[in-house]
Image (cartoon, rainbow, N blue to C red):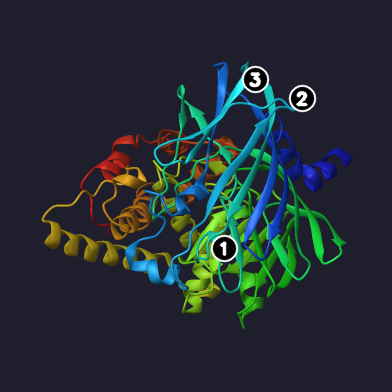
């Protein structure tokens, strides 16, 4: 009985602790300069080689360089340009100052990639499979004045994807990511983060993981932020935050807001999301879930243990749906990872379907699965008709990388809308409960790992005892355009 009691109390943490073994560790010392909106940073990287290949270099994605003046990568579409650059055009970047090992020996490094978006660090000695190599990177980050996941606006400083993060080494090569004006042009693996950040004392901080300690130092604060077994790390700072926190299961759900008369309802939605998705798919494994209202050009953005919700959303029903969508990403992208650039439907379509399951489990929101399917089907038919008339013929396949979609509306309607309709169709074919069982198996099998479409479909075939590969393929690569 004692063993069962201990397991019930600490089981969720034990999973995280196990997942935190034999992964890359990042340790940061950061200082935020409010006057020029910059970050001075030093990071220690304990890189764990998960591959079977000895590696003589480690490559990192430098996402902030997409925001620099000379960048060839687009961070925002023309239709959202003025909303994003509300104060006129502004630029940001990351500059690597020095790379060195623990004996203070400088390591050779190069800024490369298609558009200065990659840092290559040459090691003194190759790191062997299943072993660590350690080194330090000193850098500065200039934060643009822009309503984006990386940028500062009138209410928040959003620090998403602001530091060098190791590229995924896969199939004998480094996966180097090019920024895209739509979608989530990111791909990373589970790692541990320990962050010390200094910032003005009149700011409140929200972050991935938990705030382990905060102390005062004159007119500044120093916070220690700790996150184990997460896929990325993000921070939001604001002078205006109010914070409401309540607990559900073993998780503190916190809502950071500055303009929400229905803040208690927003917090309640966050709590219900953690509870419902945990019951449907498997327990949320972390101690913190931070829902953060912010200056953001799009509706929302997911990071582990933290989601951005745009303060520009006009109606509260959409605001609520965005909270549910971004929290569902904690399961699909966060715990179960995927290559978001090549297979965006695998987390976005599944996240939209998860929202539909949420509404069925919570009828007090007065939104039915049938209504969502009808709306999605109508939306897709309109997209098909308009684009068909304009272009004559359109590519309706979902299985494409971000850069292969011709426009943002095409990306949205195929990845989100058609991706959702695909899973609604599978649910109609094999039954909703079997789909939920398949998702439970998918979650438990690939928790803290990276899954592929083949892995996803394999779980459905195995649990449903049905051959579904051709059915999925018809939706992903074929011509299906409606769901009845």
Q: Is residue 466 visible?
A: yes
Q: Secondary structure at mark 1?
A: strand
Residues at marks 2 and 3, CA–CA distance in whole angstroms:
22 Å
Residue depicted at x 38% and y 36%: 466
Q: Residue furthest right?
A: 2
Q: Residues within 10 Å of mark 2 (few under 14, many from 20)?
A: few
Q: Which of marks 1 and 2 precedes in the sequence?
A: 2
Indicate which disc residue 103 carries: 2
Q: Nearer the viewer, mark 2 or mark 3?
A: 2
Q: CA distance from mark 1 to mark 3?
A: 35 Å
Q: Earlier in the sequence, mark 2 or mark 3?
A: 2
| Residue carrying label 3 | 130
Residue visible at 24% across and 63% down in the picture: 383
Foreground pick, 407 / 360: 407
Nearest to the observer: residue 276 or residue 163: 163
Q: Which residue is mark 1?
A: 308
């Amino acid at each position: 009985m004692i063993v069962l009691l201990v397991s019930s109390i600490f089981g969720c943490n034990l999973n995280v602790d196990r997942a935190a073994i034999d992964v890359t560790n990042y340790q940061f010392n950061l200082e935020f300069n409010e006057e020029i909106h910059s970050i001075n940073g030093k990071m220690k990287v304990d890189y764990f080689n998960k591959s079977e290949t000895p590696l003589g270099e480690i490559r990192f994605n430098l996402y902030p360089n997409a925001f620099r003046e000379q960048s060839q990568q687009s961070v925002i579409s023309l239709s959202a340009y003025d909303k994003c650059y509300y104060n006129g055009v502004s630029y940001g970047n990351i500059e690597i100052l020095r790379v060195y090992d623990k004996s203070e020996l400088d390591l050779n490094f190069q800024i490369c990639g298609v558009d200065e978006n990659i840092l290559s660090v040459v090691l003194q000695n190759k790191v062997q499979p299943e072993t660590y190599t350690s080194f330090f990177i000193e850098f500065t980050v200039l934060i643009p004045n822009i309503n984006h996941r990386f940028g500062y606006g009138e209410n928040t400083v959003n620090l998403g994807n602001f530091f060098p993060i190791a590229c995924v080494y896969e199939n004998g090569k480094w996966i180097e990511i090019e920024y895209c004006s739509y979608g989530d042009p990111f791909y990373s693996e589970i790692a541990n983060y320990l962050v010390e950040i200094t910032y003005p004392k009149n700011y409140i901080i929200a972050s991935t993981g938990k705030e382990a300690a905060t102390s005062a130092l004159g007119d500044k604060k120093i916070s220690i932020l700790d996150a184990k077994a997460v896929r990325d790390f993000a921070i939001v700072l604001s002078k205006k935050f109010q914070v409401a926190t309540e607990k559900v299961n073993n998780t503190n759900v916190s809502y950071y807001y500055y303009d929400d008369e229905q803040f208690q309802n927003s917090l309640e939605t966050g709590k219900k999301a953690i509870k419902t998705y945990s019951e449907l798919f498997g327990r949320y494994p972390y101690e913190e879930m931070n829902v953060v209202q912010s200056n953001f050009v799009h509706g929302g953005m997911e990071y582990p243990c933290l989601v951005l919700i745009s303060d520009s959303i006009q109606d509260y029903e959409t605001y609520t749906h965005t909270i549910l969508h971004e929290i569902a990403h904690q399961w699909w992208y966060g715990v179960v990872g995927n290559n978001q650039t090549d297979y965006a439907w695998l987390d976005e379509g599944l996240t939209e379907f998860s929202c539909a399951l949420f509404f069925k489990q919570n009828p007090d929101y007065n939104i039915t699965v049938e209504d969502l399917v009808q709306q999605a089907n109508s939306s897709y038919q309109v997209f098909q008709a308009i684009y068909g008339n304009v272009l004559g013929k359109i590519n309706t396949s979902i299985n494409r990388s971000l850069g292969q979609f011709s426009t943002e509306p095409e990306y949205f309607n195929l990845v989100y809308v058609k991706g959702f309709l695909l899973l609604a169709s599978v649910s109609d074919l094999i039954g909703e409960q079997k789909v939920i069982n398949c998702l439970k198996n998918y979650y438990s099998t690939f928790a803290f790992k990276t899954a592929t479409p083949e892995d996803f479909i394999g779980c459905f075939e195995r649990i449903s005892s049905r051959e579904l590969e051709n059915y999925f393929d018809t939706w992903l690569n074929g011509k299906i355009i409606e769901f009845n």
